[in-house]
Amino acid sequence: MNLRQAITLLALLTVSTANGLTIVGYDPATNDRFASGYPSSPAANTSVSFLGNGYDLSGVGWNPANTTQSFTMISNQYFVYSNHYGPSSSMNFFSPALGSVISRDVSSTSYNFTFNGQVSDFAIGKLSAALTPADGIAAYPVLYAPTIQPYLGLQVLNYGHGSNGPRLGMNLVDAYGSFNFPNGGTVDDSFGIGYSYNSNLSGDSMFEGGDSSSPTFVPWNGSLAMLGTHSVIATIGSTPYSIDNFIPFYLDQMALNGVDFSVIVVPEPSRTMLLLLGACALLRRRHRAPRE
């Protein structure tokens, strides 16, 4: 299905909800980033079952004026978010190195990107001053492949908010295409990837109100790589989908704007795969095995 045809079913993610990121079989020990104290004095979740065990999540900060809203560093000064849910004048981080919350001012400078000549829902902001090594805050590379095929079927970690602070859930990349958001009209303005939701699959996750701008990560060789920023949710046919702004699609524009970022290059499995930049606007779905 064309994502433009599904636009009437989209639920915008700017409205906060009590429950946050939906996770099948949600368990605080497995899914919550912090064990307690968020947002003023967070204590790390050290459970052996925590999905984020072994990964550095310090580069995901939050808006102190709206603590359900998250942003993610891609360098020591630039961060990614969704255009319809932008930052305020400052951002907070939890520094494991310092054992405390640190605050940094956000610059008025921002970068908007385009698709089909329209302003898209993907955007980048900038801190007023760069983070330093002493701050102990991570920055994440973008996972890059020259075609769409290597992304399909990848397991991801979806980051979102919850009643006890931010949380992590799992999913698989199984859709891609252009969609029309946030500008309305008849021209698709954004390019995204999607994750179908199966309420019978333990650990499966789906975005909820207030999750916009939060990141989707791919675990890669023991660390985390960026893939998307949460944008919209939709029911396509009878299947619920979470849809991210797809960061790799915008790398050329980021470079032209002088944005600092790094990439992890995914080996291409075949020269015959469809080029990403030539991907059509139709939603492509990769069917998962039946799940009980």
Image (cartoon, grey):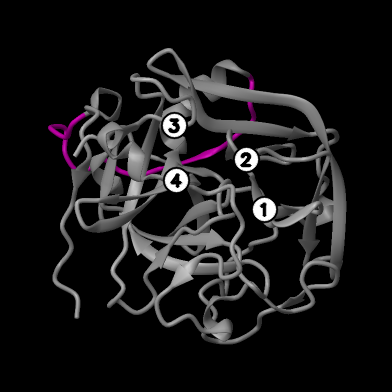
Residue type marked 1: Gln
Nearer to us in this view, 46 or 113: 113
Sequence-wise, which precedes: disc 2 or disc 1?
A: 1
Part of the protein shown in magenta: 258-274
Residue under label 3: 181
Q: Position of residue 291 (x, y in %)?
A: 19, 75
Most common secondary structure along the magenta stretch: loop
Q: Residue type at mark 2?
A: Tyr
Location of the N terminus by quadrant is top left
The answer to whether marks 2 and 1 mark residues whose Cβ atoms lie closer than 8 Å is yes
Is residue 220 at all visible to an observer of this figure? no
Query: What is the CA distance from the residue labelled 4 to the residue labelled 1?
Result: 15 Å
- Label 4, residues with CA under 10 Å away: few <14, some 14-19, many ≥20: many
Q: Which residue is mark 1?
A: 69
x 63%, y 32%: residue: 124
Observer-nearest of 239 and 213: 239
Task: Kindly indicate the quadrant of the structure image that contains residue 24.
Answer: bottom left
Helix, strand or loop for disc 3: loop
Q: Which residue is mark 4?
A: 232
Of labels 2 and 3, earlier in sequence is 2
Tag 3: residue type?
Phe
Residue carrying label 2: 85
From the top left corner, tell me how far across and down residue 104 is, in percent: 86, 45
Sequence-first tag of 3 and 1: 1
Left or right, 260 with respect to 287, comes to right
